[in-house]
Image (spheres, rainbow, N blue to C red):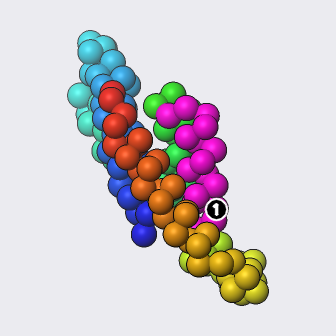
Amino acid sequence: MHACYIEHFGTIKLRNYMNSRILQIIESEEDTRKDVKNQLREDFGKNLEKLSAKDIVFLLYAFQLIDSDTYLKLRKIIIERNKLVHPARKGIAWRYEKPERTAKELLQQAKEYIQKIQQITV
């Protein structure tokens, strides 16, 4: 569930960043045709929706919207979450070896870092 929030809020911040830093620059260029600008905006929106949580976190870090500590913590949360939610990828034994406390700690960490994403200003 928390991966959905990371994707949702991360996507919002990436869209705001792209609109304010990249697309506005393109729109201010007089020699760029209007149809090219519209196509770039449309393609960006479609591609952004297809990104995974790991990709979104990477882009937030690459655009310096989050620091390296936040990036590493979010990656760890996503990896651990995937192990719990998709155990067949690595075998089901791991899922039952982890104590329930780990899942609760993971959820708490996710909440903290989702709040950090929400506080990003672009």
Image height of 42 relative to 7, above or below: above
Report the magenta stretch's main SS.
helix
Under mark 1, the amino acid is Ile
Image height of 105 relative to 27, above or below: below
Residue 117 is a magenta residue: no
The image shows residue 81 at horizontal and vertical percentages of 58, 68
> As drawn, is 51 to the left or to the right of 34?
right
Specify the quadrant of the image occupied by residue 93.
bottom right
Residue depicted at 36% across the width and 34% down the height: 120
Residue depicted at 61% across the width and 34% down the height: 68
Front residue of this view, candidates 87 and 30: 87
> As drawn, is 31 to the left or to the right of 51?
left
Front residue of this view, candidates 51 and 28: 51
Determine if residue 61 is in view.
yes
Q: How many marks?
A: 1
Residue receiving disc 1? 79
Determine if residue 43 is in view.
no
User: Farthest top residue?
Assistant: 30
Residue depicted at 51% across the width and 55% down the height: 109
The image shows residue 38 at horizontal and vertical percentages of 26, 36
Image height of 35 relative to 9, above or below: above
Element type where label 1 sits in the image = helix
Front residue of this view, candidates 76 and 34: 76
User: Farthest front residue?
Assistant: 101
User: Farthest left residue?
Assistant: 34
The image shows residue 98 at horizontal and vertical percentages of 69, 77
Specify the quadrant of the image occupied by residue 102.
bottom right
Q: Which region is colored magenta?
A: 66-82
Residue depicted at 64% across the width and 55% down the height: 76
The image shows residue 26 at horizontal and vertical percentages of 33, 21
